[in-house]
Every structure is written in structure tokens, then in C-alpha cells.
Amino acid sequence: MADPSLEGEYDPERHAGLYGMQRFKAMSSVILALMLSILDYSVANVALPTIATDLHSPASQAIWVINAYQLANLACLLPLAAIGARVGFGRMSQLGIVLFLIASVACAMSQNMLELTLARALQGVGSSCIMSVNIALVRFIYPHKLIGKGIALNGLFIGLGVALGPTIGSFILSISSWPWIFWINLPLGGVAILLASKALPKTPRSAVKTDVPGSLLTVASFALLGIGLDSLMHGDLGWGAGLTGWSLVSWWFLLRWQKKRQEPIVPLDLLKRVPFLVACLVSFCGFVASNLYIVAMPFTLAIAFHKNPATVGLLIAPWAVGVAVMSFTVGKIADRFPASLLSSIGLLVTCTGFILLCTLPLDASNMAIAWRTLVAGMGFGFFQPPNNRAIMVTAPPGREGGASGMLSVARLSGQTTGALLVAGLFTLFPHPAFICLGAAAFVAFCGAALSAGRTLLRNRPARVA
């Protein structure tokens, strides 16, 4: 049952990893930087109503506090991953922490919604510096035979960050004003930058020159597409169609330009590898399904089940608990069993959890909702680490940065697509809460089927335009 990719493309010297206290310190640095990024995203969600009231802005403008962060993060991932391969993954992570802290100060000192939105975009760029090389660093911290454990530990703390964020945000807002959700980043970031400067491994650097036109085209392509689709989903058809059309033009120029590059920013060379391509598509499906649930479930609980805000928070928490627990558990076997088995099982369990939630009666007890949510979260936690491992180990030596960036792109683009689908369904239907859950179950099932079929496709060449 051993995963054949365990003996796949790696350099025994390049991917020897660290041991003992060196590994502990390096991984602690990676986790601190990761938590900085994850916590601030989820903490800011909780503070949106307070921020909107304090800055005298409508909710439609306040949402851009979240959108600006996520869009900047997504648009910059691949260019920054390519630059990270050239300057060193550790240096890129340190730059991200510094940018994040500068942006946090700017956020805390913002006097109006425009200032805050621009500061959040800069914070998103800092987060992108961290996330673009996060898994690439894990690839060098852990030896090849233990890479699944390292990726699972990464997933565990992502789950903890998502789970702790709303609680921390609510606590800060209960004792102080909203700027403190940004000031609180300074001590955590200070420790992270100090540890990163001493503990992160020095990684081999790419000799390929930075592709400035390709970087600009990549940022434009993602940004125009994200804003255009968001406008379409909110009913602004003229503006949305125009921006989406320009994004397609930008993508056409980008892909033509990338074909000429030795190490393309959009990793077409990696996407020609069927195991890599399928693993990215499975990840995309998983995160589309998860965000269809995460974004819509609070509305489902409040409107359909008539739960108060405090209860809604408690009933969503089992999802993050399940993700964190199972991410840690599956890490013990992710290096011994194929992702086609483990990830398929995980997504099928997630699909089952969503179906169980979708078929609940409207007078269901809190316990009935909570255990079904826990099941869905446990399945998602079981799916992620093996699939992420499959993405990283199928990339050849020298392309760890492109693989790490693409892993984050698959996650963020899936989350963004899921959120856009929720917005579209809420626009089309008066009561779409259970429709969103049904859609989440369907997408999770598609991801499971695609994951299960990757063994049959392992050795076939992929065609990428």
C-alpha cells in the first residue's frame, strides 16, 4: 500500500531535511508566520460590523476589508513564489512578515474605509509572501520520507488558526476597540521575524531571472477576474462582464508569454504532469466545497434553524476542531498510503457530513447539528495533508517554489470560487441556504471521484494550453 511517489522526484541531498532542535526551531518559525496570516484573516471577519459602524460605511464597502486582503493574496502568490525561488524561500518569508507588520500598523491607524482597504491589500501582499513559500520551506525542513508529517502539522495549525480567530476577535472587541485586532499582530510578528532570521534553512536559489512582464500580467489576470466575477455575482452585469472580458484577454497574453519561459510563473511545466494537475484540481474542488459550507452555514443556522449569533459560532466551531484533529492524525500515515486512497476517503466523509446537515429537520437539536458538522470537518482534515503532499512530491527538484505557490493558488481560488457561488445563489434564490449545502456535497463528491481516479491517470501526459 506504500505510496509509489515516495520514491518519486527528489534529490537525496537537496531534500535531506533538518533534524532535532534545528527542525523544531525552523518549523516553529514557519508555523508562527502561518498563524500570523491565518489569524488576522479570520479575526477581521468578526470585526466587520464594528468597523463599518465606526468608520460610517455601508456593509457593501466594509466587505472590501476582507476582499482586498484575499484578492491581493491570491493575485501575488505565483509571482512571489517565483521570486522566492530566486532570492531564497526563507528571505521571502521574512519579507512577508515585515510587510505584514507594516500593513498592520497602517490598518490600526486608518481613519476611513479607503485607507483601511488599501492597508489590508498591502497586508494581503505580505500574507502572500508567507503563503507562497510556506510549503516549499516545509519541503526543506522535513526529510522526504517524513514530508507528509510536516504538511499535516501545517494543516493542523491552519485549522487551529481558523478555529481560534473568531474567539480571539470577539475577546479583543469585548475589551477594546477594533484597531487592536491589528495592533495585536506586532508581538506575534516580532517573535516570528526573530525566529525566522535564525532558524529557517538556506535553500538553493534559482538562477532564472525575474520575469517582470509575466509577474505584472499574472497579478492583472487574477485581480481583474476576481473583481469581475464578484461584480457579476452581485448583479452588476455591465461592470462585471467588462472586467471579466479584460481578464480573459490578460490570461491569453499571459499564457502565450509563459510558453517562452524556462521556469514559468504560471507553472505550465508542472501542470503538464498529470499527478500534479489532478492533485491541484482535487484541492480546488475541496476548497470550493468547504467555502460553500463555511460562507453559507451561518445564514443557514440563523435563518433556517433560528439560532442566535452566539449559538451560531458554537455550532460552526466543530468544523475547525474536526479539521485540526484529523490533520494531525492523518499525518502519521500520509507518507505510507497513496493520496488517491486517503484524500478520496476524506472528501467522501465530508460529502456525507454535508448531506446529513442538508437533510436535518428545522427543529434539529444543537447536538444533532454539531456532530454532523464535526463529521464534515474531520473528513476535510483527512483529505488535505495527503493531497498537499502529492502536490509537493510530484514537483521536480528546483520547482518547489512553483509547486508551493500553485498549492496556495488552488486553495485560495477554491475558497474564492466557493464564496462567489454562495453570492450568486443568494442573488438567484430567496432561501438558498440548503441549496448551498447540497452544492457543497456535490462538489465534494466530484473531488473524491477525481481523487480516486488519479491512479489510472498517473502515467498519462497532460495537455495544457
Image (tube, rainbow, N blue to C red):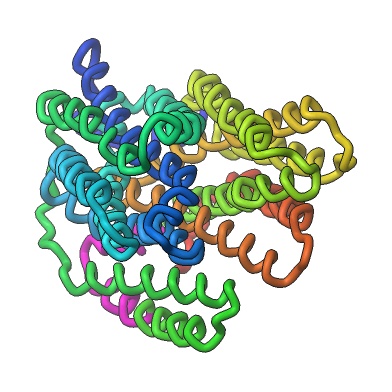
Write the residue at 31% across / 65% down: 114
Q: Nearer the viewer, residue 372 or 86?
A: 372
Residue 252 vs residue 296: left or right? Answer: left
Looking at the image, which is closer to me, 452 or 50?
50
Report if residue 192 is visible in the image: yes
Q: Is residue 386 magenta?
A: no
Q: Position of residue 120 (x, y in %)?
A: 31, 55
Q: Is residue 88 left or right of residue 421?
A: left
**What's the residue at 41%, 25% (across, down)?**
153
- Reply above or below: 37 against 227: above
From this view, report whether residue 234 is shown above or below residue 123. Answer: below
Query: Considering only vertical position in the picture, is 46 above or below 11?
Result: below
Q: Nearer the viewer, residue 26 or 72?
A: 72
* Residue drawn at (50%, 21%) of the image: 328
On the image, the x and y values in percent for residue 141 come to: 26, 27
> Is 424 situated above or below 274?
below
Residue 9 visible to the viewer? no
Left or right of 207 on screen, residue 426: right
* Magenta stretch, residue numbers: 252-271
**Can you give x and y, in whole percent of width and height, for residue 22 in the image?**
19, 17
Residue 258 lies within the magenta run: yes
Screen quadrant of the C terminus: bottom left
What residue do we see at 59% from left, 39% from top? 340
